[in-house]
Image (cartoon, rainbow, N blue to C red):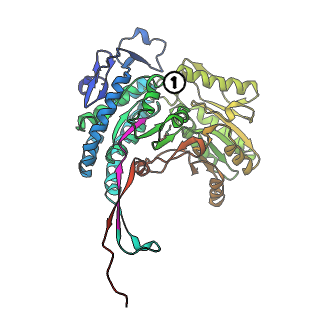
């Protein structure tokens, strides 16, 4: 069970500690932040059971300073630790993580209302990601380049240049609430294999899951200071962390906060992924059963709270009626309820998210969208809703609900679909998209025309497998993720040039 047994060390009464210098510590701030269970929000104050009302410590700026200092010191010797040893520790952490998938998944269920099976999948996927990163790191960090000077005009063969990849220093990782374990390890593992130290600032909802995950790295035996986890509200310690002079690189996944971070961060490399209004373009020749299945998977898994969720369907008018009927029939079969029961649709993460989604729904109603189901909400639980005949004047045509509400826009040409996809006024339109057609040539032309980081042909958008490059265009992100890209991003090239004496050969 979460917070007990092996994990008891991370708790002090009902208060979760933070992790620094290889130890679980209680903050001197004595300040705590409540984490509200999205499902039981109405009764939480009466229930004293752990994880129904979880508290975590909010770190002080002084504590953050100490964490940065010890991360900086520890990194120096970590960078000198042989690569194979770094990989070995990561493999160990991955195994511990997978072994303890149940208590960590339990946290995900209680904290972010992730359906029970998906919660377990997230932890297992995270273990696999850590192991894969260790192996990939051994491969790509073990290689360098060798250049000779006489390949450039005017030079003799008097210089040998050896290049290798070196760590950046201290990496600050800020993952989002929807994958507090997986999107944390997707930053932690590349940072550590590359010889960096890492400071994790978990999301408030998801912090307890992240702390349990960090404990697995602690149990694996990483040296003190190599990994730290500081908790507190982003609004209170966020700026202090992201503008901290001790930070050498920031890897962030989340919403608009990323734009603010990119403006405030110093001269450090940034890796950012800020969401997507991922479009699904459906052509007349598409396999509509396949499309409907992918709209359900892509639009409604984890109640639409994924940056890669299908967030707008752009379907050719001639097949729209049939497609909408097929999707409606599938929506009717979705189970709605608590994550513990492994329902398909579970409560969204917070009341403010539910209110935001409701605002989009009301706006669509006022402007004449066709409701394929009745709009229903109970607390944070919103029933799945397909909105047909959505027009560009409706907010839902452009904004990300991050909930189980999906707009359908009927189009009369491919160009119209591409235009909508590319014309978004909102910054997030450019992460992923998908196109359904049996004509691969057309699909590739459409992929080329869509201004998104990835286009999936005949499948819903998705980040995984986790070694695939993953990136948004325009304001949707900076840099590219995926295991290999993340390792490379968290390193710098170092050159050592061996200067040889000028050759004293004679020609001819
Ligand atoms: O929410 C953003 C995630 O990167 C999406 O990942 O496609 O595996 O659900 P996913």
Q: Could you tell me residue 272's position as x and y percent?
A: 50, 41
- Count every numbered label the image shows and give the total: 1
Position of 127 with respect to 268 (left or right) is left
Position of 400 with respect to 126 (left or right) is right
Position of 228 with respect to 186 (left or right) is left
Question: Which of the image's four quarters has the N terminus?
Answer: top left
Q: Is residue 299 visible?
A: yes
- Quick check: 419 above or below 363? below
Q: Quadrant of residue 233?
A: top left
Position of 251 with respect to 320 (left or right) is left
Q: Which residues are magenta?
A: 160-174
Residue at screen point 25% across, 42% down: 92
Question: Which of the image's four quarters has the C terminus?
Answer: bottom left
- In the picture as drawn, the residue positioned furthest to the top comes out as 46
Q: Could you tell me residue 379's position as x and y percent?
A: 55, 17
- Quick check: 136 above or below 460? below
Q: Quadrant of residue 25?
A: top left
Dot 1: element: loop
Residue in the foreground of this view, choosing between 373 and 35: 35
**Residue where numbered disc 1 is placed:** 347
């Amino acid at each position: 069970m979460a917070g007990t047994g092996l994990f008891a060390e991370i708790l002090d009464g009902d208060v979760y500690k933070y992790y620094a210098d290889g130890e679980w510590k209680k903050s001197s701030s004595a300040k705590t932040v409540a984490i509200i269970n999205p499902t039981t929000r109405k009764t939480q104050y009466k229930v004293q059971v752990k994880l129904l009302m979880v508290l975590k410590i909010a770190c002080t700026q002084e504590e953050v300073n100490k964490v940065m200092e010890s991360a900086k010191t520890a990194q120096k010797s970590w960078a000198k630790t042989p690569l194979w040893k770094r990989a070995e520790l990561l493999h160990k952490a991955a195994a511990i993580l997978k072994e303890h998938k149940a208590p960590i998944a339990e946290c995900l269920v209680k904290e972010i209302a992730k359906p029970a099976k998906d919660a377990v999948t997230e932890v297992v996927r995270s273990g696999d990601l850590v192991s894969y990163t260790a192996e990939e790191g051994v491969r790509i960090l073990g290689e360098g380049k060798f250049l000779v000077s006489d390949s450039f005009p005017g030079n003799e063969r008097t210089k040998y240049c050896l290049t290798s990849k070196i760590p950046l220093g201290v990496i600050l990782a800020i993952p989002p609430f929807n994958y507090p374990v997986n999107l944390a390890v997707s930053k932690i593992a590349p940072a550590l294999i590359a010889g960096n130290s890492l400071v994790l600032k978990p999301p408030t909802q998801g912090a307890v899951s992240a702390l349990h995950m960090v404990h697995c790295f602690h149990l694996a035996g990483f040296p003190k200071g190599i990994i730290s986890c500081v908790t507190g509200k982003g609004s209170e310690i966020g700026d202090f962390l992201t503008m901290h002079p001790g930070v050498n690189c920031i890897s962030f996944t989340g919403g608009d906060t990323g734009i603010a971070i990119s403006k405030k961060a110093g001269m450090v490399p940034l890796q950012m992924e800020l969401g997507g209004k991922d479009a699904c373009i459906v052509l007349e020749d598409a396999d509509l059963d396949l499309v409907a299945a992918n709209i359900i998977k892509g639009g409604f898994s984890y109640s639409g709270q994924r940056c890669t969720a299908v967030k707008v369907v752009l379907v050719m008018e001639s097949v729209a009626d049939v497609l909408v009927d097929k999707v409606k029939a599938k929506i009717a079969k979705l189970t709605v309820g608590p994550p513990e029961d492994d329902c398909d649709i579970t409560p969204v993460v917070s009341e403010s998210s539910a209110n935001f989604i409701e605002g989009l729904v009301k706006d669509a109603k006022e402007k004449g969208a066709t409701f394929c189901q009745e709009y229903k909400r109970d607390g944070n639980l919103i029933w799945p809703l397909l909105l047909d005949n959505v027009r560009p004047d409706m907010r839902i045509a452009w904004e990300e609900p991050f909930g189980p509400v999906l707009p359908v826009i009927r189009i009369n040409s491919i160009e119209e679909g591409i235009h909508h996809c590319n014309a978004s006024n909102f910054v997030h339109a450019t992460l992923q998209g998908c196109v359904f057609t049996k004509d691969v040539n057309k699909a590739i032309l459409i992929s080329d025309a869509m201004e998104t980081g990835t286009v999936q042909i005949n499948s819903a958008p998705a980040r995984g497998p986790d070694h695939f490059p993953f990136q948004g265009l325009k304001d949707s992100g900076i840099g590219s993720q995926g295991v290999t890209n993340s390792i490379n991003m968290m390193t710098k090239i170092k050159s050592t040039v061996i200067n040889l004496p000028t050759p004293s050969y004679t020609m001819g």
